[in-house]
């Protein structure tokens, strides 16, 4: 049985150069849709790799499709509105993605300025940041001479004057550990996606992944506000807010949350799909779990950040998964 996507089968021998390019791009999109459907099997992965590697044009088209997928989400290939990548987003239709017209090119160029694919270049908001870390990089900064901010991988921060005498920062994206001084002065404020986190003599971890902001109090007391809602956190309490509002505080193991400071990634009974999402923050390219059943398997392990790809070997051993490497640092787990 021929397992190639339908568009691969319905091709002729008389395509013009333009028609051939359009056909190859459609085929690349079809392969990517299959890989990320959650239903791809070993034969799909094998046949897809053969298709990608048999022609340099196939390789180029697949990389283009992968970048588009990362930036716009799967709905861009289905004629639906893309999933929100941040609290406010830009959408593009399949016609815009595949049409190739001037309007589509302009729209996609504008989108990529706001939300670049695969982190190949900084977004518009990140370019306005005062401090930024690249993939796998950490950096410590001191704000207003007294507040220490440890920036994790892929993090962008801008300095902000919150009030006349109160310093602060905006966490544009990524993750940071903030240690504020004690004393009678105004609280140090971290703004992120329209919410505010503040504390005096406190230490807290704050993370903005584009969908939600998560705040974990490590030491002292922290106040979190979003919209009209506010919450106070004690040590080892965590809260999340997103467009639906401010959640409820919950107790967590703060040592696991901040383990990245010690170059550690710690996973305790986490679904593999969540583990891979976290691993992808620390490596170039992207790991994709192509089978939804595999993605639901619970996984526990500790990894050094610099050796994050060790997860691939572990998944092979524990679950009998197949690891397939594709161009651009893309890896399929099936």
Image (cartoon, rainbow, N blue to C red):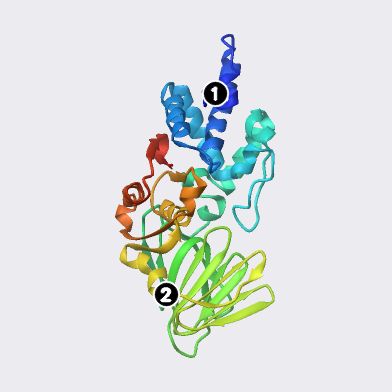
| Residue appearing at x 58%, y 59% in the figure | 211
| Residue appearing at x 51%, y 72% in the figure | 215
| Residue appearing at x 54%, y 23% in the figure | 24
Q: Which of 184/175 is in front?
A: 175
Q: CA distance from mark 2 to mark 1?
A: 49 Å
The quadrant holding residue 56 is top left
| Figure check: 255 above or below 1 | below
Number of the front mark, 2 or 1: 2
Q: Is residue 177 left or right of residue 80?
A: left
| Figure check: 210 above or below 247 | above
Residue 195 location (% of width, % of height): 61, 70
Q: Residue furthest bottom?
A: 184
Q: Which of 155/1 is in front?
A: 1
Element under disc 1: helix
Task: Note whether residue 279 is visible.
Answer: yes
How many C-alpha atoms fall within 10 Å of the one at disc 1: few (<14), some, or many (≥20)? many
The quadrant holding residue 145 is bottom left
Residue at mark 2: 253
Q: Is residue 85 left or right of residue 35?
A: right
Residue 52 location (% of width, % of height): 45, 27
């Amino acid at each position: 049985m021929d397992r190639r996507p339908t568009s691969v089968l319905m091709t002729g021998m008389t395509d013009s150069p333009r028609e051939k390019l359009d056909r190859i791009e459609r085929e690349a999109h079809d392969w990517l849709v299959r890989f990320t459907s959650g239903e791809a099997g070993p034969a799909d992965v094998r046949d897809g790799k053969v298709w990608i590697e048999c022609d340099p044009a196939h390789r180029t088209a697949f990389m283009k499709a992968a970048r588009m997928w990362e930036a716009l989400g799967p709905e861009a290939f289905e004629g639906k509105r893309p999933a929100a990548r941040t609290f406010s987003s830009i959408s593009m239709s399949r016609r815009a993605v595949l049409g190739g017209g001037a309007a589509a090119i302009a729209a996609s160029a504008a989108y990529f300025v706001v939300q670049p694919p695969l982190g190949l270049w900084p977004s518009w908001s990140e370019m306005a940041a005062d401090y930024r870390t690249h993939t796998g990089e950490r950096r410590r900064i001191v704000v207003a001479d007294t507040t220490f901010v440890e920036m994790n991988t892929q993090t962008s921060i801008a300095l902000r004057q919150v009030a006349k005498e109160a310093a602060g920062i905006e966490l544009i994206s990524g993750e940071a550990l903030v240690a504020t001084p004690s004393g009678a002065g105004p609280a140090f404020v971290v703004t992120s996606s329209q919410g505010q986190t503040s504390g005096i003599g406190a230490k807290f971890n704050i993370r903005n992944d584009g969908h939600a902001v998560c705040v974990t109090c490590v030491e002292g007391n922290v106040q979190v506000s979003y919209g009209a809602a506010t919450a106070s956190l004690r040590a080892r309490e965590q809260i999340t807010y997103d467009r639906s509002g401010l959640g409820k505080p919950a107790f967590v193991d703060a040592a696991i949350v901040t383990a990245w400071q010690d170059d550690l990634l710690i996973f305790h009974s986490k679904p593999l799909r969540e583990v891979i999402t976290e691993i992808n923050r620390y490596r170039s390219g992207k790991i994709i779990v192509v089978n939804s059943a595999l993605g639901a398997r619970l996984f526990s392990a500790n990894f050094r950040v610099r050796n994050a790809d060790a997860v691939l070997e572990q998944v092979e051993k524990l679950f009998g998964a197949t690891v397939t490497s594709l161009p651009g640092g893309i890896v399929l787990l099936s």
